[in-house]
Amino acid sequence: MGMTMTQKILAAHAGLDSVTAGQLIKAKLDMVLGNDITSPVAIKEFEKVGLDRVFDGNKIAIVPDHFTPNKDIKSAEQVKVCREFSKKMGIVNFFEVGQMGVEHALLPEKGLVVPGDVVIGADSHTCTYGALGAFSTGIGSTDMAAGMATGEAWFKVPEAIKFVLSGKPQKWVGGKDVILHIIGMIGVDGALYKSMEFTGDGVSALSMDDRFSMANMAIEAGGKNGIFEVDEKTVEYVREHSLRSYEVFKADEDAVYSEVYEIDLASIKPTVAFPHLPENARTIDNVGEVRIDQVVIGSCTNGRIEDMRAAAAVLKGRKVHEDVRCIIIPATQKIWKQAMNEGLFDIFIEAGAAVSTPTCGPCLGGHMGILAKGERAVATTNRNFVGRMGHPESEVYLAGPAIAAASAVAGKIAGPDEI
Amino acid sequence: MLRAVRRKWSEIMNAKGKVIKYGNNVDTDVIIPARYLNTTDPAELASHCMEDLDEKFTARVQKGDVMVAGKNFGCGSSREHAPIAIKASGISCVIAETFARIFYRNAINIGLPILECPEAAQDIKDGDEAEIDFDKGVIKNLTTGKTYQGQPFPEFMQELIAANGLVEYIKKSLAK
């Protein structure tokens, strides 16, 4: 029986010729990731194992990005635990403030993930690296501890849903709109325990940044991972960012899928997900009148250079509405510098937006833009659960950078063509 | 060998208590809001458990209580603080129609008993008394007398739990 892309990667890392959906396997890991929230718990568990070394100091990354720059004493203590552990264990890829970025934007940029890899991360959006044709999935802190100790993890081999993409997205439509459309279609548990495999001619019309946004939100459909077929754009990206050799896995012709969806990218309109689930997707022409208080442009979903450019294209020569705070957070230092050199910060600052150092900050209601009771935000982040960005009675509307920037100008949810 | 493991498993894994019930898509942000994630202390986490969804939970929960919920329980963030907070609040078992996969792994890894059983999750009401036999995957609603067959864990996961979680399991396998 044929295997999916994910199944082939897992089989190769388990030392097996083939695997089938439902099979429990142990796979070798190419990268184990944690952040400042999940790593301290993992380190505590790791210490219980009683080892004085990690399996490979080059294959672990610890990125303090959630509550950093440290927002309070407790957070500072957490990061200290991460820092001291990384030093003691010879973990090369510990990224201090100044080097640090939002983890899922940072790792591909640093060339730490390449096609065909198996990656686990104690952060649910670890599925982002599927954009590179890697198998990557979120796990918890105990799995991270076990991964650091043994270099292996157990997996139940997933079934897959195939998304056959065709056509080209319209102006102002990016990966975020496509993935919100898909989550709206299949629901927040539509891909529960499954892989989401993205394939078809339409993939070539999506930039790497579009693909990172889409793979990033596979988890919001319940997916175990989201994965794209490797093409010329992937190869070019990897060549630019990594010196590692890699292997490209393709799904077999006769691979079995639990469902197949055909999606014409040209038919997708700019999309917004209403509170309090990412599946509450509405196209921009169906949002009605929603006044807002804040806009956040950033995060592991949409804090990359193309997102900065899209926001700048909308904000150029315009002003942020007097009732709105607009916070823009380039996801890494490299993106920050690039945006600065391209003059995007001039546009943002002249428009009246604030530009922050890289952090996950407001996305999870940590710091750098928390909402008060009754406030509403349009955010390019990935979750709009109750209380996600602050007060339990605040609201988050998810969208791509073009809608977010246009909404900042309009003071209400709006598309770039409406301002 | 297997019998010995099984017996140990069933000793660890029996639950009986009053039901506290929630709906679909209970996410880890409401189980434990991120504003409390600057600590890893189970008792402190438990003191804020469920507060954005049900502010009465911490006052109401008794040791041994059973949490019952709908589809996709534990969706969202990978924070292990979520099952840790539930376990430390005294909940003996979570029954749901389905679990989000990271929560499912985390619960097993930290030794919070969970069971998937759509029928029981739909039927059982808030305030009912429930008893769970994990070895057989059987849930009994003591209030109505009705029993339900849930999905027992595969053997590998039973071994994980019998070993008292993943860390202990690994310790044993590294010692070999």
Image (cartoon, coloured by chain):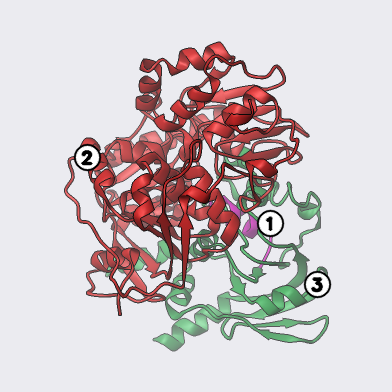
Chain colours: A red, B green
Q: Kindly state the secondary structure of the residue where label 2 is placed.
A: loop
Question: Height in image: A65 above or below B105?
Answer: above
Q: CA distance from mark 3 to mark 2?
A: 55 Å
Whether pointer 3 and pointer 1 mark residues with C-beta atoms closer than 8 Å, the reply is no
Give me the disc on residue A242: 2
Q: Indicate which label's residue lies in the foreground, 3 or 2.
A: 2
Circle 3 chain: B
Question: Height in image: A357 above or below A363?
Answer: above
Residue stretch in magenta: B79-92
Tags 1 and 2 on a common chain: no
Can you identify the residue that label 3 sits on? Answer: B125
| Residue A216: % across, % down | 45, 48
In this rendering, position of residue A323 left or right of residue A38: right
Q: Residues within 10 Å of mark 2 (few under 14, many from 20)?
A: some
Q: Kindly state the secondary structure of the residue where label 3 is placed.
A: loop
Mark 1 residue type: Ser
Q: Residue at x 69, y 61 (%)?
A: B90
B174 and A324: which is toward the camera: A324
Circle 1 chain: B
Can you identify the residue that label 1 sits on? Answer: B89
Q: CA distance from mark 1 to mark 2?
A: 46 Å
Circle 2 chain: A
Please report whichever mark, 3 or 1, sits nearer to the chain's N-terminal start. Answer: 1
Question: Height in image: A301 above or below A332?
Answer: below
